[in-house]
Amino acid sequence: MAQPKAFLFDLDGVIVDTAHFHYQAWRRLANEKLGFDISEEFNESLKGVSRTESLDRILAHGNVTLSPAEKETLATLKNDWYVELINKMNPDDILPGINAFLEKTRLAGIKIGLGSVSKNAKPILERIGILSAFDAIIDGTKITKGKPDPEVFLKGAEELGASPDECVVFEDAVAGIEAGRRAGMKTVGIGQPDILTEADVVLANLNNMTIEDLRKALHF
Ligand code: G6P
Ligand code: MG
């Protein structure tokens, strides 16, 4: 049976709580510029989805049609608001248990990769001081297709020299779990089991998680 060789982590909602900031910025855009509200439930369908695709989904949700130029302006405005929020972050914003889990991963000889659709991924990792913990970083600047397409994770595996069946994906998004599964990897959902129904295992967070317990849960 394959041994885990690489762990691929999503960023927003797994390493840091920026999923909440994305929602805040999109919600402000919908409220102030589009004249409708978006619920937290609807926001689940935006998680892991690229900036342009997220805007398209929001516009469709509110039955609003805009020109490509207007969409560009709104996507830029959302990102400006989002960047304002992430610029206030510091190492204390790393989610509970992440630093310890990354350390355990390294000690177990397992490679660490980032698999995020976000174009803000690198500045965020720098800001929270964990950029150097990653052996490979695949972000929105390196891919052409967002999740649920498996591209981001397949590229991560390739850069880390692992085959898909040697990789584990850590994800908070439904689209991200689907991307991991389509890549042929095992998936750990971070969040609620009733939302992340397709994940192999669902955990509330990685606090106190050991590599051994995880391997057992994933049948490695
Ligand atoms: C991640 C988040 C999404 C976000 C996407 C693009 O996948 O989960 O909510 O839309 O990245 O992020 P960006 O920072 O490039 O707008
Ligand atoms: Mg996420």
Image: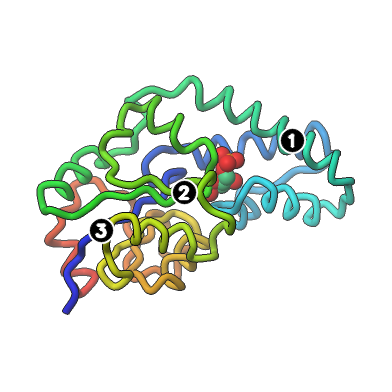
Per the image, label 1 sits on a secondary structure element best described as: helix
The location of residue 115, given as percent across then percent down, is: 42, 51
Per the image, label 3 sits on a secondary structure element best described as: strand
The location of residue 62, given as percent across then percent down, is: 82, 51
Discs 3, 1 touching: Cβ within 8 Å: no
Mark 1 vs 2, N-terminal side? 1
Residue 212, visible in the rendered structure: yes
Instruction: Determine the image quadrant of residue 21.
Output: top right
Cα–Cα span, label 3 and label 2 = 15 Å
Classify mark 2: residues with Cα within 10 Å, few (<14), some (14-19) or many (20+). many
Q: From the viewer's perspective, is residue 37 above or below residue 87?
A: below
Quarter of the picture holding the N terminus: bottom left
Give the residue drawn at x 73%, y 55%. 57
Residue at the spot of label 1: 29
Discs 1, 2 touching: Cβ within 8 Å: no
Mark 3 vs 1, N-terminal side? 3
Q: Amino acid at mark 1?
A: Leu
Q: From the viewer's perspective, is residue 212 above or below residue 88?
A: below
Residue at the spot of label 3: 6
Classify mark 1: residues with Cα within 10 Å, few (<14), some (14-19) or many (20+). many
Residue 198, visible in the rendered structure: no
Q: Is residue 73 left or right of residue 150?
A: right
The location of residue 72, given as percent across then percent down, is: 78, 39
Residue at the spot of label 2: 116
Give the residue drawn at x 29%, y 64%. 167
The location of residue 182, given as percent across then percent down, is: 46, 73
Tell me how the rendering is colored: rainbow
